[in-house]
Image (cartoon, rainbow, N blue to C red):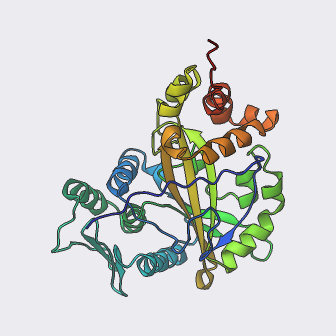
Amino acid sequence: MMLPSPRNPFPIRTPFRVVSDLYRMGTSPFGELETTAFIFDDTYPEMIAEKLRVLQHYPEHGRCWLPDDLDDLTACLWSVAEYMATDQPDYLTYTEEAFTAHLLGITLRRDGDLVRLATPSPFVELAEACFAHLQAQPPFERLCDMLALSVQEDLVIGRPALDDRADYMECLLVALPSHWIPLEKVGLSFMAIHLPIADSERLVAASDHVVQAISTKGPFVRYNWTLSTADWARNPATDPTFADKSNALYRLDDPQAMLEQLYLRVERQTTVPFLPHQRYLFAIRIYQHTMQAALTTDERRERLLSCLESIPPSTLEHRSSLHGVMETLCEALRPKRSRVEVA
C-alpha cells in the first residue's frame, strides 16, 4: 500500500500573534483544502515507531487519563475509533465488533482480543513490535495504545464545562508533544493549559468560546508552529538529551548550517465533537521539515523573516526555541546584497 508524501504546511502569519482561529473542514486556510481530521503519509512507520518507543519506555507520559469515569471514556474511545475509520476508510475499518488498522495488520475486538490480519502489514517488523506491545497491555491501555498506534496524530479527549464544573482534559494519548509534558496537563482546563504561553491573552480570553465551539460544532482545523530539532517526540521528561540538542542549535552561528539543521515544526490540530459522550477529540498531527526544505519560495522566506522580526521581546524571553536561534536565523533569511564589481 503506497502512502503519499507528507504535506509541507506553512501557517506563518505576519505580524506574529497567538490566535484562536478555527477553520471548518472544507475550507483552505493556508492554501490546502482541508477535508479530513486525520491524514496518512509515508512518514507513518517512522512516527509510529517513535510513538511505540515512548509507550514502551515512558507509558505514563505517552498515555495518561483520569480514572473517574472510565466506562464512559471507554465508550467514547470506541466512538473515536468509528470516526477514524469513517474519516480514513482506506486505512482503517470499524464494525460493532472490532477496529482494524490495516497498515499494522491488527484488529482489536470489542472483547479485548487482538487478531492478526491474513493480509500482512507492509511494515512487518513494526507491526510485530506493535502487536507484542498491545498484547501485553491491560484492556483499557490496549484500547488507548491501539488508537494511538493506528494514526499519525496524537489524541486528546476533553470534556466541556457542565453545571458548576470547568472544562478539563480527561485523556491524553500524546507521545509526540512539542516542547511540553502531557502528564502535567491531564485534568487541566483549556485556559489553564494556555496561560503560561507568552502573548496568549487573545487565546485565553476566548477559551470558553473555543471549548464551546469544539465540543458542539465542527469538525475544525487550526495550525500552530515552532522551531525545533529533528526529533518527533519533544518531551523534556522523556528525552534526557532534550536540553543538549536545543543548546547545540542555539550555539550555531553559521546561517547556512542553521537552515540545514533547524526544523520548522508545524502542528495541524483538528477537533471533533462527540455530543452523546459530552466529550470532544483534539487531534494533533506533526509535520516537520528543515528550514531549507520548508522555505520553498522567496515569498515563504520573506514572510517568515517578517514574522520573526515582529515578535515582541517578551515573547522571545518565554519562547527559548525562538530566542536561541533568532539572530542567526534572521541573518540566514535576509536577502543577500548583490556585489557589483567596479572595473
Q: Indicate whether 167 appears above or below 72.
A: above
The x and y percentages for residue 77 are: 48, 74
Position of 140 compared to 185: left or right?
Answer: left
The x and y percentages for residue 116 are: 20, 70
Find residue 181 and report its image quarter. Answer: top right
Q: Residue at x 38, y 44 (%)?
A: 57
Q: Indicate whether 90 appears above or below 210.
A: below
Q: Nearer the viewer, residue 337 or 299?
A: 337
Q: Indicate whether 334 appears above or below 234.
A: above
Position of 292 compared to 127: left or right?
Answer: right
Find residue 114 and report its image quarter. Answer: bottom left
Q: Residue at x 77, y 43 (%)?
A: 198
The x and y percentages for residue 135 are: 27, 62
Position of 134 compared to 210: left or right?
Answer: left
Find residue 172 and report its image quarter. Answer: bottom right
For the C terminus, give its image quadrant: top right
Residue 339 visible in the shown view: yes
> Total label count?
0
Q: Residue at x 38, y 58 (%)?
A: 5
Position of 16 compared to 154: left or right?
Answer: right
Q: Residue at x 74, y 74 (%)?
A: 212
Residue 237 visible in the shown view: no
Residue projecting furthest to the top: 343
Residue projecting furthest to the bottom: 96
For the N terminus, give its image quadrant: bottom left
Q: Nearer the viewer, residue 322 or 51?
A: 322
Q: Nearer the viewer, residue 29 or 297?
A: 297
